[in-house]
Image (cartoon, rainbow, N blue to C red):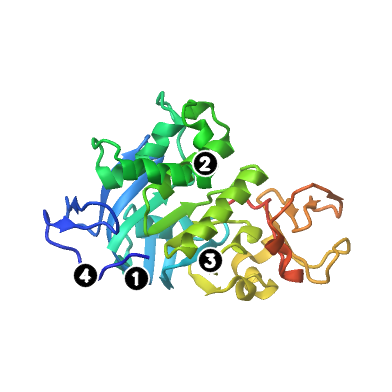
Amino acid sequence: MRTRPGAMPDAGSEVPACSGPPLEATSTSPLTVVAVVADDMLRIYRCSMASAVEVTDLTVRFDEVTALEGVTHTFEPGTATAVMGVNGSGKTTMLECMAGLQKPTSGTIQGMSGNLAYVCQHLPACWMPITAGEVLAMGRYGKRGLLGRLRGEDRAAMREAGAQLDVNQFAKRSFGDLSGGQQQRVRIAQVLAGEPDVIMLDEPVTGLDIPSQERILEVIEDYSSRGAIVIITTHHLDEARHCDSVMLLANRLVAAGTPDEMLTEERLREAFGDRLLGDHADHDHDQDFIVLDDHGHGHDHHGHDHHGTGHSHDHDHSRRDHSHDHGHHGYQDHGLHAH
């Protein structure tokens, strides 16, 4: 990861990017928007980022409601972190604070020296007559500016990102005509084309087909391994296995550690409470667990649907091999939709 030390410069001074030509600072605020694309489809931020991002005693209150209370955590470069918790546990609020979209009640976020990209969970329909290739090109706004011409290095970054997500063949197609999974892959490619040092993705694979899920998760793993910080929110315990660390939130930090340490019955019950069910007779292992969604449905890592009746239905959901490498800890929860 290309990093540099230093605090925020004075307004108007040059803030060098981690690669490419320098951009001018336009504000003294810690995070300055340099591109807002397709009605909030993607936001890319200028930030002052050190080798790690340190969240300290982060608290957010909305009137009488406490969204986050005293959350402290360090995000290290070269790691992918899965942030997990039930609906209203503060996952999205934490990302919004880190992206500068939400002002915390108290606490600090420090260590910010490169580019940060944040992809929201609920993206509006793209009403613009725009091609997938043009959407991908928007990822370079942070490098060339809103009105800058595409250079050779821009096109090379776009081709590489498009190839990683297998979307280059959609370049001339209308973005609005693509399937949901194809659109999300284009959005993730757009993010990668901008070469950010920090990527935050709010439920990036929720509702997508299995091939799209797998492709996106593989790319997330690869990108973090190159030195970037990647943070995703998810309800899928299986997805958390693709990450280096897991944070469990319940409006506070329940615990943080490796997937093997966090995805245990004890830890999951602390975060999910009654949504977690224990052993079931039809399981192949002694210690399998199911996470329920808001409708009382749940899914285990064998692909069985559970509807609170003891019946199950097989689904041919192939998963990456390493999702089953952990024996009875190979949880999955495709049914949990709340955030």
Residue 211, horizontal then vertical, whole percent: 65, 45
Task: Categorize mark 4 by other alpha carbons within 10 Å: few (<14), some (14-19), many (20+).
Answer: few
Say whether residue 134 is left or right of residue 304.
Answer: left
Q: Which mark is residue 51?
A: 1
Q: Outermost residue, top direction?
A: 129
- The type of residue carrying mark 3 is Ala
- The type of residue carrying mark 1 is Ser
Residue 73, horizontal then vertical, whole percent: 43, 72
Task: Categorize mark 1 by other alpha carbons within 10 Å: few (<14), some (14-19), many (20+).
Answer: many
Residue 315, horizontal then vertical, whole percent: 80, 47
Observer able to see residue 109:
no
Tag 2's secondary structure? helix
Circles 2 and 4 in contact, beta carbons < 8 Å: no
Q: Which residue is mark 2?
A: 184
Say whether residue 149 is left or right of residue 163.
Answer: left
Q: Which mark is residue 250?
A: 3
Residue at the image position 74 percent from the left and 58 percent from the top: 301
Tag 3's secondary structure? loop
